[in-house]
Amino acid sequence: MPIHFISDKKLNLHDLSGILSGKMRVQLSEDAKQKIVRCREYLDNKLAISQQPIYGINTGFGSLYNRHISHDQLEKLQENLVKSHACGTGPEVPREIVKLMLFLKAQSLAYGYSGVQLVTTERLLAMFNENVLPVIYEMGSLGASGDLAPLAHLSLPLIGLGEVYHEQKRKSGAEVNQQFQWPSIHFQAKEGLALLNGTQFMSAYGTWCTLHSHRLMHLANMIGALSLDVFDGRIEPYLPQVHAIRSQTGQGQVAASIKKLLEGSELIAQPKKHVQDPYSFRCIPQVHGASADAIAYVTNVILTEVNSVTDNPNVFPDDDMIISAGNFHGQPLALALDFLSIALAELGNISERRTYQLISGVRDLPNYLVANPGINSGLMIPQYTAASLVSQNKQLATPASVDSIVSSNGQEDHVSMGSNAATKAYRIVNNLYSILAIELITAAQALTFRRPLKTSRDLEEFVHTFREHVPFMEDDRVLHNDIQKAEIFLKKFQVNFPA
C-alpha cells in the first residue's frame, strides 16, 4: 500500500479521499516525530521546575479546575479522565468515520502543540493501519469542550479498555492489544486531555460529508440534465447570457456544466411546443448553483479544521507558554455542517419535484412511465419514497447550532452542538443518494419512451452503464432492489479531487 506521511503539509480533498479509500497506510514524518518529542520534553521540564497550576495538567477538569493534583497522581488523573468520559450512547459510529477519527486525531497531535508522547500518537496510527477500529457511540458530545465522549471511546483501547472491531469481529481492547503485543499506554500529564479535547468526531463526519457532497453535486447535475432532456425541456435557460447578468458563481458553473452535458442531444435540439418549463427544470442553475456555493464554503471550513490543532491547553515550547483557551469549540463546524445540510436537502427537494413531473403523464410520456398502466403501477410509488426522504431531510436540516445547553456546573456555558449537526448531515447525505437514485431510475425509464431520439453522448454512456445494474422495467417488479442497486451505483461513481 502507498504510505501517507503525516506532516505540517496542508491536507487537501485528494489526500482525504485517499485516506478514506482504505487503500493507504499512514506514518509520522521525521519532522512530526521531532515536534511531538520536543513538545513533550518541554512540558515534562516545565512540570519538574514549576508548581504553578496548569489547567488539566495538574488541576481537575471543567468546573474542577481549581483542584490541585499532586505530581504522583498525574497519570491516574489522565486515565480517570478517559474512563469517566466514555459515556456515549445511541447507534454505533460507522467504521469508516471511526477510521477517519483515528487519522485526524493523530494529525492534530502531530503538529507538536499538544504535549503527548510519541508512543501515543504512533499507537493511534498503528490502529489505523491494522484496521483496529474502536467502538464509538453517536450521542454524547456537545461539540464544545471537544468531542469528549466519542474521543474517550476512541482512546480506551490505548489503556486496554473498551471494545474494537478487527477482522469483522468485536473484541475487547485488552484482547486486541494482546493480539498485536501492544503494551497499554501509561498516560503522562496532559495526555488524556489532549486525546479528548478536539473536534475529530465532528471533523471526521464533516470530511466524509464534504467528500460525498462533491460527488452528489456532480451527480445531481448529470441526473438533472438527463431529466431535463427526457422531459423535453428547453436549453435557453442555460445560455451564458442569462447567468452573466446575475454573476452568482455556482449558478454560472452549473448552467455551463449542464449545457455542456447536453451538447449533441437530439432531444434538446428538437422543436418545442411549450414556451417554458417548470421551475424544477428551468431553475436548476439557480438552485443547484446555490448548493454548489454552500459546498465550496463548507469545504474551506473543513479543510481549515483538519489542518488545525483543536485540543486544550496548547503548549508553545518556542514561546515558553502553556495557554488554556478554546480551540476545541466546534462553532465553525456546527454552522458549516448546518449549512451543508440545508444545501443538500435542497438538492433532494428539487430532485423529487423532477421525478414527480416525469411520472405525471405530461409531454407525451405515459403515466408512471409504463406502457400498460393500470395493471402495472410502474414508477408511481418510488416518488412516494422520494417524498418521504425529502420530508425527513427538511426535518434534519433544522439547525443544531442555534441550540446551547449549559454544562460543567456553568463553566462550559456555551456549546456548539456541532456533533448533532454532523450526524444529521451524515443522514442527509445518505438520504440524498436514495433520492437521486430514484430520479435516475425515473429519467432512464423515460428515455426509452423518447426513442429513437437520443440524448447526448455523455448521458447516453451514463445511462448505458447504469443499465448494466438496473434494467428497463417492462412490468411491475420489486423496486426496492432497483433503488438499492442505483444507490450503490451512485456511491461508486468516480469523482476526481484536485491534489
Image (cartoon, rainbow, N blue to C red):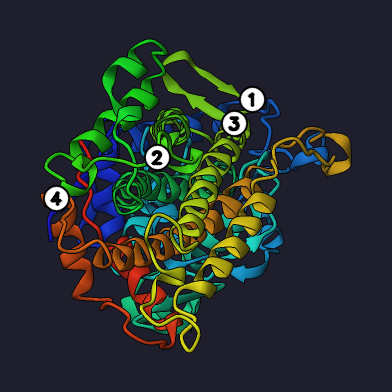
* Marks 1 & 4, CB-CB < 8 Å contact: no
Q: Is residue 248 left or right of residue 62?
A: left
Residue under label 3: 313
Q: Is residue 467 left or right of residue 243?
A: left
Q: Nearer the viewer, mark 1 or mark 4?
A: 4
Residue under label 4: 458
493 or 442, nearer to the observer = 442
Q: Residues within 10 Å of mark 4 (few under 14, many from 20)?
A: some
Residue under label 2: 274
Indicate the amino acid at tag 2: His
Q: Nearer the viewer, mark 2 or mark 3?
A: 2
Q: Position of residue 385 (x, y in %)?
A: 56, 69
- The disc, 2 or 4, on the residue closer to the chain's N-terminal end is 2
Q: Position of residue 10 (x, y in %)?
A: 29, 30
- Please, which residue is most extreme toward the top here? 245
Q: Is residue 83 visible?
A: yes
- The disc, 2 or 1, on the residue closer to the chain's N-terminal end is 2
The residues tagged by marks 3 and 4 sit, at their Cα atoms, a distance apart of: 53 Å
Q: Residues within 10 Å of mark 2 (few under 14, many from 20)?
A: few
Indicate the amino acid at tag 4: Asp
Q: Is residue 212 left or right of residue 186?
A: left
Residue under label 1: 325
Residue at horizontal 28%, vertical 52%? Answer: 19
The residues tagged by marks 2 and 4 sit, at their Cα atoms, a distance apart of: 26 Å
For residue 245, above or below residue 127? above
Indicate the amino acid at tag 1: Ala
Residue at horizontal 18%, vertical 35%? Answer: 260
Residue at horizontal 89%, vertical 41%? Answer: 409
Indicate the amino acid at tag 3: Pro
* Marks 1 & 3, CB-CB < 8 Å contact: yes
